Image: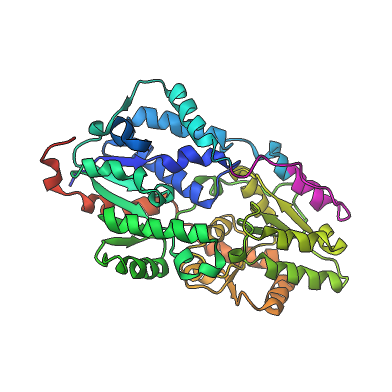
Amino acid sequence: MTAPPIAYDLTRLLVGPTLPVPRGIDRVDLGYARYFLESWPGDCVGILPLPWGLAGGALVLDRQASLKLFEWISTAWGESNAADGDPALVHVKARLADPHSELVQPKPPSHFRPHRAAGLLFKALLHLGLKGIGLRSSVPRGAIYVNTGQFGLAFPWLTAWLDGRPDIRRVFMLHDAIPLEYPELVTPWGIKLHARMIANTARRADGLIVTTEAVRVSVRRELGKCSRHEIPTLAAPLPVAPVFLEPEPLDAELAGKHYFVIIGSIEPRKNHALLIEVWRRLVEKQAPVPKLVIVGTPWRQAQEVLGTIAMSEGLRRSVVCVTGLTSPALRRLIRGAEAVLVPSFIEGFGLPIVEALALGTPVIASDLPAHREAGGAFVTYLDPRDAAAWENAIAAQSRHLEREKLKAYSPWDWNNYAACVMPFLIGMADPASMLGPVS
């Protein structure tokens, strides 16, 4: 069967630059957009939903206009910038070079600027012009609508335009069901948004993509509460973004530096507190202490972690906090680390795990089903509540020995991923959808 047309939802990518740099979920969305716009063998259009039913509820960008918007967003995020000029990386290098330095990173851009979303849409349309932009009726008949960004699923009006196009099949991606299963680890607002995602998926999805078998079980359990057990679901591990597959020698300024990295927003679920306890113990032993580089946006209850660091001279000198790293800069930082640490209490996948392994950097992670699906036999797994075990593993870490073992690791890239996802999407196409009116 020939590849059906794809209508890819660009909402998250457009709103994404309200953050200074892409997060893991944003890199996934970027990867999907690039694959569909550059490599999908059938037709492909981009979708930008509009509020209040304006213009039929959605703007439709043809392939060229969508590619132009994609490049504009990538540039806004600095995805093609050289790592050397990244001010956040310059800050980290300065802290690593001087063990007595207590330099504070220059204030990064505001972490979240939702009020800019409307302005970004206006700027994007000015950038694109009117060429290549149509309304809901211009989506090819029988297309597969794909939404991997999750963002739009929490607000039903962003997908309401689909009700006027019954010929379109709908495939959503859900990354996890964590807010509903572990409400104590998220905000009440996060729980509410995720409940909306599940309800909207139950109402409108014809197919579903998830990241692990563990997530498949969780999501299907939640969908069952909405009487939707039967949605065809593909569980496929996330691929490594191309930026983390580019060969690059070890940065001369990072070579020989003894540091570990944790990546992710600073919030209770990521379990930064465990690592702060480990570093407190290392400092008390008065031996040479490796640096801990915390890469991530301060989020819920972040002040508890940051405040603990601020009150201890030893921690201030051995823990570096940084936000705003571009993907090329993050790649370079991971490449030079002793190991990437992932002590989360719960995850749907573990993108930092596969990104680190692809760069040949060892990983120590919490023993979770999703982490084991992501890292397999190449990761050291520990109880996320056992600080002593983490301290021992970090103290015993030998970068050179572990990197030798990781030479056998084969990254799951976009070629592998597309070969898995493409048959699923083609199988979603409904020949009957090629008939009937389009409104």
Determine if the magenta segment contains residue 164: no
**Residue 23, percent across and down?**
55, 49
Q: Residue at x 44, y 46 (%)?
A: 29
Determine if the magenta segment contains residue 104: yes
Q: Residue at x 77, y 60 (%)?
A: 307
Q: In the displayed structure, would residue 412 be above or below residue 166?
A: below
Q: Residue at x 39, y 69 (%)?
A: 218
Q: In the displayed structure, would residue 421 be above or below residue 60?
A: below
**Residue 396, percent across and down?**
72, 73
Q: In the displayed structure, would residue 136 be above or below residue 155?
A: above
Residue 91 vs residue 218, the one in the foreground: 218
Q: In the displayed structure, would residue 242 be above or below residue 133?
A: below
Q: Is 187 positioned to the left or the right of 218 in the image?
A: right
Residue 18 placement: quadrant: top right
Q: Residue furthest front?
A: 52
- Residue 4 in view: no
Residue 313 vs residue 279, the one in the foreground: 313
Q: Main secondary structure of the magenta part?
A: loop
Residue 331 vs residue 125, the one in the foreground: 125
Residue 405 vs residue 92, the one in the foreground: 92
Q: Residue at x 38, y 53 (%)?
A: 417
**Residue 184, percent across and down?**
55, 69
Q: Is 387 positioned to the left or the right of 40 in the image?
A: right
Colour convention of the picture: rainbow
Residue 6 placement: quadrant: top left
| Quadrant of the image containing the C terminus | top left
Q: Which residues are magenta?
A: 90-112
Q: Is 187 positioned to the left or the right of 160 in the image?
A: right
Q: Is 92 positioned to the left or the right of 80 in the image?
A: right
Count of marks overlaid on the render? 0
